[in-house]
Amino acid sequence: MTISTFNKLENTTSDFELLKSESEKKWENLNLYTKVYGYQIQENSKWNKGLNEKELSDFQSDLGFGFPECLKDFYRTMNGLNKQGINFRGGENIEPNFGSIFYSYPKDITKIKEQIDWVRKDNKINQEQKVPNIFPFLGHRFLIIDNYEQVLSIVGRDIICWSDKLIKGIALDIFEFDHFKLPDKKYETDGFWNDKIL
């Protein structure tokens, strides 16, 4: 995928299909780096089949909040990967470990809930506060479930804007575009998360 194609991406089913096919092409031949920490996508990884409407409804019920159309379209198109990510843990004669990169349902529902709880706890959000819900779709990338549908990168209380659209937030990680060299955008979020952004 080129930067020019990336810049035209919208949260539509057809663009999620494009993202799916382009990413699978990229993953056909991958060089894994054994001297780094963190999960990497394995060669020849493919996206799992998307969710049907009943599964999507169950997913939202399990989390206790509704999804915006962009998140539904993402999960209608794809639902995690067929191979787990591999983490060589620096390659110092330690066995690699494996884990999900893009979260799938129902397999990763516990991990998704743990990620949400972790961020809420670190940011001292209690159940009574009216704070827009967040949804982790990959590692520490979260979609804000608000009127703007922005993507944040959240590690505890370290919060930065990542993308103005879900599809672009996903593409940034897959295609490893230099986020800070992309055209400047003014991201908007509902008040609470705006106040937390670094």
Image: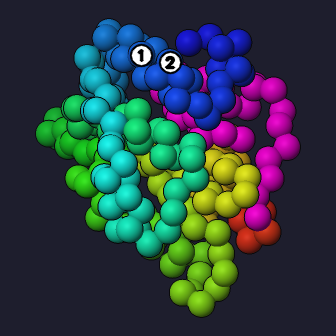
Q: Find out whether the residues at labels 2 and 1 contact each other: C-beta distance under 8 Å.
A: yes
Q: In the rendered view of the protein, which quadrant contains the N terminus?
A: top right
Give the side of residue 147 with respect to residue 19, left or right: right
- Residue at 79%, 47% in the rendered image: 187
Callout 1 amino acid: Ser
**How far from the left and from the top, in percent, is residue 159?**
65, 58
Task: Identify which residue, 71 or 121, lies in the foreground.
Answer: 71
Task: From the image, tell me which residue sits under label 1.
Answer: 21
Task: Identify which residue, 162 or 93, lies in the foreground.
Answer: 162
Q: CA distance from mark 2 to mark 1?
A: 5 Å
Callout 2 amino acid: Leu
Q: Residue furthest front?
A: 53
Q: How many marks?
A: 2
- Residue at 76%, 64% in the rendered image: 190
Task: From the image, tell me which residue sits under label 2.
Answer: 18
- Residue at 67%, 60% in the rendered image: 146
Is residue 52 depicted above or below 113 in this figure? Answer: above
Is residue 111 depicted above or below 69 in this figure? Answer: below
Please report the bounds of the magenta region as a residue range: 164-190
- The image quarter containing residue 31 is top left
Assess whether residue 85 is covered by the magenta stretch: no
